[in-house]
Amino acid sequence: MQYYARYASSAVAAAAVILMVAGCSSVKLDEQAPAPIVDAGAGGAGGAGATDSRAVAPVTTASTKGVDPFTDPNNPLSKKSVFFDFDSFVVKSEFQPLVEAHGKYLAANSGRQIKIEGNTDERGGREYNLALGQKRAEAVKQRLLLMGARDAQIETVSFGKEKPRATGSNEETWAQNRRADIVYK
Amino acid sequence: MRVEITGVGGQQFPIAIAPFAHEGAGAQEVDAIVRADLARSGLFRIIDAGAQPIAENANVNLADWKTRGADALVIGSSRRLADGRYDVRFRLLDTVKQTQLDGLSYLAPAAELRLTAHRIADRIYEKLTGERGVFATRIAYVVQTSRNSWELHVADADGANSQAALRSREPIISPAWAPDGIRLAYVSFETGKPVVYVHTVTTGERKAVANFRGSNSAPAWSPDGRSLAVTLTREGNSQIFLMNADGSNVRRLTQSSGIDTEPVFSPDGQSIFFTSDRGGGPQIYRMPASGGPAQRMTFGGDYNISPRLSPDGKLMAYVARRSGRFQVMVHDLVSGTDSPVTDTARDESPSFAPNGRLLLYATEVNGRGILASASVDGRVRTRLSGPSGDIREPTWGPYIK
């Protein structure tokens, strides 16, 4: 991520240098009569309605192998977080499609392994929350096993309240942090 | 002369600690450290001694000090020598009997000036109470310095002089001192999950002693330092296991279907106290150190966690949730009574001083974790100094030989 950001900004800097050089060599400034200022904004060059001959319209090809199920928002496999109620480790029915999809995927792909990481909100003791987060991860694992995943494919761990996704002391952030994440190895 | 230690409502002993005569950079801090140590113990009332330094060889009119309300007076000097060491001297005087109770001189390297002040406070404490002082012992705690930066610190018992023993980009929790006062067990997330390490502070040598499938946490040393009780999830939910301190010979101690965690040995090594949700919410239980039937210890409220035993085995400190507030409590194992120690709302990790008279814990001020100490009766509570950052998980170390 950082690498791309740095690459992008240095590319912009390089482009700016080139434009400056081009400007210097092509515009002769008449010191007696200042050059008129021209608005060179979008559409200015070709006039309204004309197609910009320098425009690039990006097109992405449809993969011949089909879309990646883990990133296709229409596929339940793209969802990897199960959220829990306060002090609870019950997997709510709204997450059934998610556990079903991952359970069946693991059953069909016995070479794949996952880690389930349990988390809690900030309230209460650190070690007790670690155990509560573990219970959440374990609850998700049990549902995956029911769908045909094998025990050896799944490691359950807990971060307790130590690695919150959202920070703040209100119900909204707490709800974000009462969570188990499925992470493919 | 003895300070009677009688718990709640006990009389505080009036003592004056005059500013020490001092010479050279840094030499002036000794008497302030002694004063703060004794005040923090909760057993002493510090009588204002004015600003005039009084050296240990000065002639003082003890009757005058008695009139000012002090039953004891401390005078002394602190001098920086040409080689950088400090010559520190003090006398402890009884203003009632008009006699000297103690007098000592120290030659301290610069790095041990604060330690010398703590040792003087320990001498005075022991002379006046008959019990060993704890001011020269050490504490450990975790400080989160930014969103992705955690440090395990070792510091003097007053929180000062803190040094990072470990820095990590992942969380560190649950430090526990070995009885030798040199090794720390703790939980580090550095490999992407909780793993228990044993770390020799003096050398920096460290070893993962519990790194099983799942989460590994909550290390507790047996009193002889040979075994560790830990919480493992390798067989499902969090359960308590016993292992040798090097990680060998692992055997399961609890057999519940829910959460069993936060084991801690009783000082005689016979029992393990722990937190369990077997009754619904988290409560504290006690079982034989070899496993077996557990007895519930806490009944007030629906959330009681983090037990720690006093060195004499008579008191259990813990954290209780009452009306959404998390407070340090003390349970008297003899009488069965529970007393609040604090009036703050986000307390965690209480631990006893090695003489059992003080509790160290973390609490929050303005959304940040801080260190605090309290007399066991809760009468005297003191905020301790610490580095900037969010401080948590303090634990009081043993006496060091």
Image (tube, rainbow, N blue to C red):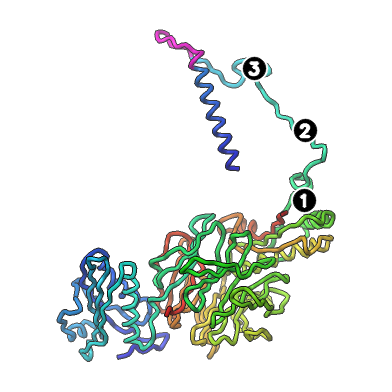
What amino acid type is highlighted by mark number 3? Ala
Label 1 packing within 10 angstroms: few (<14), some (14-19), many (20+) = many
Label 2 packing within 10 angstroms: few (<14), some (14-19), many (20+) = few
What amino acid type is highlighted by mark number 1? Leu
Q: Is residue B23 left or right of residue B394?
A: left
Between B137 and A56, the one nearer to me in the picture: B137
Task: Measure the C-alpha gap from mark 3 to mark 2.
Answer: 31 Å
Label 2: which secondary element? loop
Residue B360: x percent and y percent?
46, 74
Q: Give the position of the C terminus of chain B as an image quadrant.
A: bottom left
Stretch in magenta: A24-36
Task: Measure the C-alpha gap from mark 1 to mark 3.
Answer: 46 Å
Is A27 covered by the magenta stretch? yes
Q: Is residue A166 above or below residue B353?
A: above
* Mark earlier in primary sequence (2, 1): 2
Tell me, for residue A61, which label it has, or none: 2
**Residue carrying label 3:** A48
Residue at (46, 78) in percent of width and height: B398
Residue at (51, 85) in percent of width and height: B315
Label 3: which secondary element? loop
**Residue carrying label 1:** A77
* Mark earlier in primary sequence (1, 3): 3
